[in-house]
Structures are given as C-alpha cells and as structure tokens.
Image: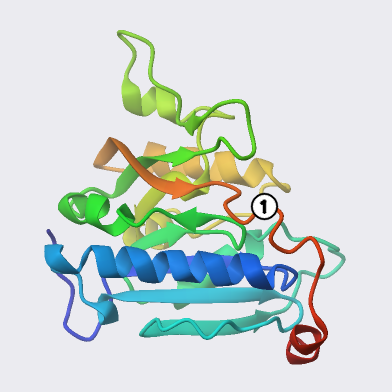
Amino acid sequence: MSSAPNDRPLFSVIIPSAGLRPKGLTQALESVAAAVAFAAPAGLAPHQVEVLVGFDGRDGFRPAVPLAGLRFFVLPRPEGRTCGFGNHIRHILMGQARGGHLLLLDDDNALTPEAFAHYLPHLDAELVIGRVDTSRAFDVPFLPRPAPQGADPLADAVRQGNIDPLCLCLSRDLAYVRCRGWQDEGGYESDFLNIRRYFRRSRTSVRLDALVGVYDAGRGLDQGGLNPRQERLSR
C-alpha cells in the first residue's frame, strides 16, 4: 500500500448533488462511513478519507454523518446551464481534493462496505476499475460486463455503456494534473469520454472482479421530495 503524508488523506470521495436527494445523499455518506469502518483492520484510519460534497447552484440538506473529513461546497452553475450533470462540480472538487486517490460517487449511489479494502492493495496503480451492481437500474446485473474470452479485460471494460465513474479509483495526479480534471464533454457523454482519457493516459491500470459500488442504491428514497425541515435547511 502506498503511503501519504500524515496530514493528508489517502482517499477523496467526490459527490456532486443538486440538493434534491437528502435521503439518497445520507445513504451515500453512510456507505462511505461503513466502508471506512470495514477497512480499519486493513490499516485505514478515519482521517485518511475525506468526502467532498458539491451542491449545484444552491445549498442543500447537509446530513450529519460522522465522517472525519466531510466538507460541503455550494458551487455556481455554469452560465446558461439548467443542468450541469455534475461535470463542473467533479472538476472543481478534484482541484480541492487533498487525497492521493479519487473516488466518484453520486448522491443516489453507494459504496459497498468492502470498497476501500479492495482498493488499498492497489494504490500503486493509477487507475483501478472495480465492479458495480447495476441491477436496480438496468437489465445488466454488473458493470463492467465480463470480458469475452481472449479479450484484454482492461480495454474491454473501458467501452461506452460498459463502465461508470462509480467503478473507478483514480490517482489524483493522473486525473487532475496530467488529464486536467473532469472535462464537460456534453452531458452524460462526459462520463465515458473522461474515463477513456484517464485510461489512455494511465501508466498502470488494474481491473478487479470485486464489487465496489451499487448504482442507483438510493432509487425511490426521495420520491416525496424534501420535507419542510429539510427544505428550510437547504435554503
């Protein structure tokens, strides 16, 4: 396991949020806390994980989840945009991140309890691709799909429709310094185009069969919207 200076975290978890999923965001943050606790026997300390939540254009409900490095930001939306798809938020928060490795979590997704434990042995790799449970959203149970026999499993993983930002653990040096962050390439297309750029520039990449996330884990939690107290607190 690579090490970081004592005052800097190993991991920065980046979460864009429109502020409309208070229950989903709470669940996402609780999943990070559970993954930190699970990885404690492997040597991960609470202060080695920071979580950066960026609200899109307006403040949102801030769950009181006990995470040592939890920070909230209210970030302006790009001029003329009604929806930034989280692209500008990811880019800004990559610049704010202090950890050497970045995880990209949305406010309706979750990490598995084992996520950090799976990543810890591979921190010498600039790009780590894990599996994500997609059964709540798609007919495909997992992404990336199993590679066909004889195919390069890494190259096969990085195909459009076969990978999600939730699958990734990225070196900050790769993503923010050498690849200049998370670029807005046009809505949802940005996910694949940024991931492909990171993969092409990565010097060392690893694909895991281990499950690291649950896509759409918060589906249905916030169907009723904000309750009155949360609405007041989000203003």
Q: Label 1: few (<14), some or many (≥20) within 10 Å?
A: some
Q: Is residue 96 left or right of residue 82?
A: left
Q: Is residue 6 left or right of residue 23?
A: left
- The coloring applied to the image is rainbow
Residue to which mark 1 is pinned: 219
Q: Residue 202: x, y in percent?
A: 32, 43
Q: Is residue 206 left or right of residue 213?
A: left
Q: Residue at 27% of width from left, 82% of height from top?
A: 47
Q: Give the residue at the far top of this rendering.
A: 150
- The C terminus - image quarter: bottom right
Q: Residue 101: x, y in percent?
A: 32, 62
Seen from the viewer's position, the closer of residues 74 and 67 is 67
- Mark 1: which amino acid? Arg
Q: Is residue 73 left or right of residue 169?
A: right
Q: Is residue 94 visible?
A: no
Secondary structure, mark 1, is: loop
Q: Residue 104: x, y in percent?
A: 48, 58
Q: Residue at 62% of width from left, 58% of height from top?
A: 108
> Is 180 placed above or below 206 here?
below
Mark count: 1
Q: Residue 114: x, y in percent?
A: 30, 53
Q: Residue at 12% of width from left, 58% of height from top?
A: 1
Q: Residue at 33% of width from left, 54% of height from top?
A: 115
> Is 91 placed above or below 155 here?
below
> Is 110 placed above or below 97 here?
above
